[in-house]
Image (tube, rainbow, N blue to C red):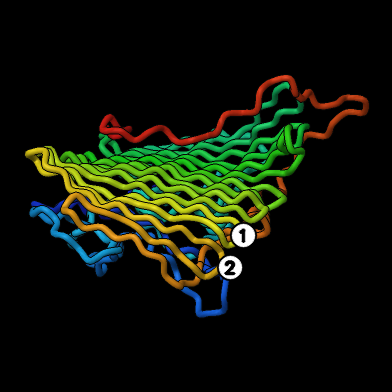
Amino acid sequence: MAACSRGLAWPPFDLTTARGAAPPWPRRPAPRRRAAIRCCCAGSDAEPRRRLSRAAAVAPERAEEWRVDGNKPSAAAPGRRRASLTAMPPLPFPAPRPRRQFKQQDFYPRCTQRGPAPQSRDTPPKRDTGIASEKEWGINLLDEAVKESGTNEDGSTWYRESGEDLGENGFRCRWARMGGQSHDGSTEWKETWWEKSDWTGYKELGAEKSGKNAEGDSWWEKWKEVLYQDEWSNLARIERSAEKQAKSGAENAGWYEKWWEKYDAKGWTEKGAHKYGRLNEQSWWERWGEHYDGRGFVLKWTDKWAETDLGTKWGDKWEEKFFAGIGSRQGETWHVSPGGDRWSRTWGEEHFGNGKVHKYGKSTTGESWDLVVDEETYYEAEPHYGWADVVGDSTQLLSIQPLERPPGVFPNIDFSSAPPPKDDPPGMSPSSPLE
């Protein structure tokens, strides 16, 4: 959408719903590069079977979509760990953000004092795109205060303002706000940029935007990255996060996601996401996480489930833990019918680090297995995207200049408090942020 001298031009917002479609399984985006770490004997790279079977892409978004088989799953061969799911069209209304790498000068006219009306690139966020980069947001703050507004030829209005806030301990926040709406208020967009710093070395770069159109569709997105020195380990840390939400104005449909990544200078890494979506009578959830301690230990897990208003429920979850080639994997696939009948299959693997793997499992239909096989052990001992990568991609964050500290004045740091709680996203229950 764009606000220019001739008014607001809004992009198409496709909300065509495939009637009778079942909820999608959101997926994690493919990593920038993936290196399977071999921890035992020589062999070719391989990925552990940790996910549901993939369906062919059936929409421009190429999102993986799933539907539960209405019949009770039949017994499968021992060791099989795939849900009885079929492909379906995706939730159609999110429009993708352009994939090109934006340049800051592309958006400089939006914040040029006494320039033309600001233009918005605020389109509905796309599902399962993770955390955007600094370049994609194109944040460009002015050094002087600006406060402007105006009316376009078609009656739509716009505003633009920027400034700076100061506080204790050398706190400084530079910010810019802009937005606009149609003459009748049926369409609207807002966007805010900011950068923060203080004398402790804390730096923050962020952006937030929202919008709505004449059909009642609305969306919201927030992005942030932070640099600080951990008070307990004395190590530098960088944290990145993104929240996204979109709602349909025509039907009971929408989705919400929160993504986060945390890194420190010794290789400690934590990543995860919580997701929720609804399409009329169907709802689905997904949570996943990864933890690397920087010394070889790795924990990964995924839990995703879905349900309908008629009472059908199904899901799949797994977890793996490894250190020095020794570890375990376990998981469960399950289904509950509207009448309350439950089917499940559980499985597990124990990797001993010597080329031997103990595999076991059972299901409610009577199948079971328990055997030891010769098998190489593969897992990712290090994150595919780590400290060196995030530092290289955070040049704008690192270049934030704090206020000059007067001689003899030192930052006030409180070491008496307990370690800060984990910044976990809110739990995604049926009472989601969309309702």
Coordinates of residue 279 in the picture (x, y in percent): 19, 45
Judged from the image, the secondary structure of the residue bearing numbered disc 1 is: loop
Q: Residue furthest right?
A: 408
Q: Quadrant of the C terminus?
A: top left
Q: Is residue 417 above or below residue 136?
A: above
Q: Residue at x 51, y 37 (%)?
A: 177
Q: Could you tell me which secondary element the residue under label 2 belongs to? A: loop
Which disc, if any, is residue 158? Answer: none
Q: Is residue 45 found left or right of 336 in the rendered image?
A: right
Cβ atoms at labels 2 and 1 below 8 Å apart: yes
Q: Position of residue 224 (x, y in %)?
A: 55, 42
Q: Is residue 204 above or below residue 140?
A: above
Q: Nearer the viewer, residue 179 or 223?
A: 223
At a point 16% along the width and 53% down the height, the residue shown is 365
Residue annotated with mark 1: 324
Q: Which mark is residue 39?
A: 2
The earlier-in-sequence mark between 2 and 1 is: 2
In this picture, residue 269 sits left or right of residue 86? right
Q: Nearer the viewer, residue 274 or 177?
A: 274
Badge 2 crowding class, 10 Å Cα cut-off, few under 14, some 14 to 19, many 20 or more, is many
Q: Residue at x 9, y 52 (%)?
A: 20
Q: Position of residue 359 (x, y in %)?
A: 38, 61
User: Residue at position x 25%, y 69% from top?
Assistant: 56
Q: Residue 214 at x, y = what percent?
A: 23, 41
Q: Amino acid at mark 1?
A: Ala
Label 2 – label 1 distance at C-alpha: 7 Å
Q: Is residue 309 visible?
A: yes
Front in this rendered view, residue 231 or 77: 77
* Total number of numbered discs in the rendering: 2
- Does residue 163 appear to the left or right of 107 in the view shown? right
Q: Along the line of sight, which residue is nearer the eye, 334 or 410?
A: 334
* Type of amino acid under label 2: Cys
